[in-house]
Image (cartoon, rainbow, N blue to C red):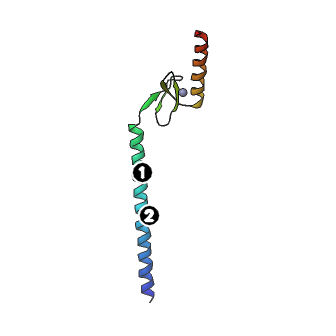
Amino acid sequence: MRLLIYIILTFIAYQIYKVVRRGLGTSEQVNRKKNDDVITAELVEDPVCHTYCPKNEALMASMDGKSYYFCSEECKRKFIEENNHRGHGER
Ligand SMILES: [Zn+2]
């Protein structure tokens, strides 16, 4: 009777081990996919501080039908402010 309990416990432990191992494998695949996305991600230049950042992480602003990308909210604000000043000056 005791032996049967040991067998069942071993079986359960093995099932848990299998699930955990499969779980780790899946998360590893997801991480690898994420890294691929980063590598293949298009880099865009921030016109304010001239740093390059991935397009999917950059902040976008549209101006005169063009799209501009920024590394931070601060750069985006600066760019829009400067553009507005320039627009007023020309007129
Ligand atoms: Zn910037």
**Which residue was labeled with disc 1?**
30
**Which residue was labeled with disc 2?**
20
Dot 1 lies on which element? helix
Specify the quarter for ligand 1.
top right
Quadrant of the rendered image containing residue 82: top right
Of circles 1 and 2, the one toward us is: 1
Q: Give whichever of 22, 78 is nearer the camera.
A: 78
Q: Is the residue marked by circle 1 packed among few (<14), some (14-19), or many (20+) residues within 10 Å?
A: few
Give the quadrant of the C terminus: top right
How far apart are labels 1 and 2 at the CA level?
15 Å
Q: Give whichever of 23, 75 is nearer the camera.
A: 75
Percent of width and height locating residue 45 = 47, 26
**Which amino acid lies under the numbered mark 1 shown in the image of this protein?**
Val
The response on whether ligand 1 sits within 8 Å of label 2 is: no
Dot 2 lies on which element? helix
Closer to the chain start, of discs 1 and 2, is 2
**Residue lying farthest to the top in this orientation:** 90
Give the residue drawn at x 61%, y 21%: 81
Establish if 11 lies above or below 21. Answer: below
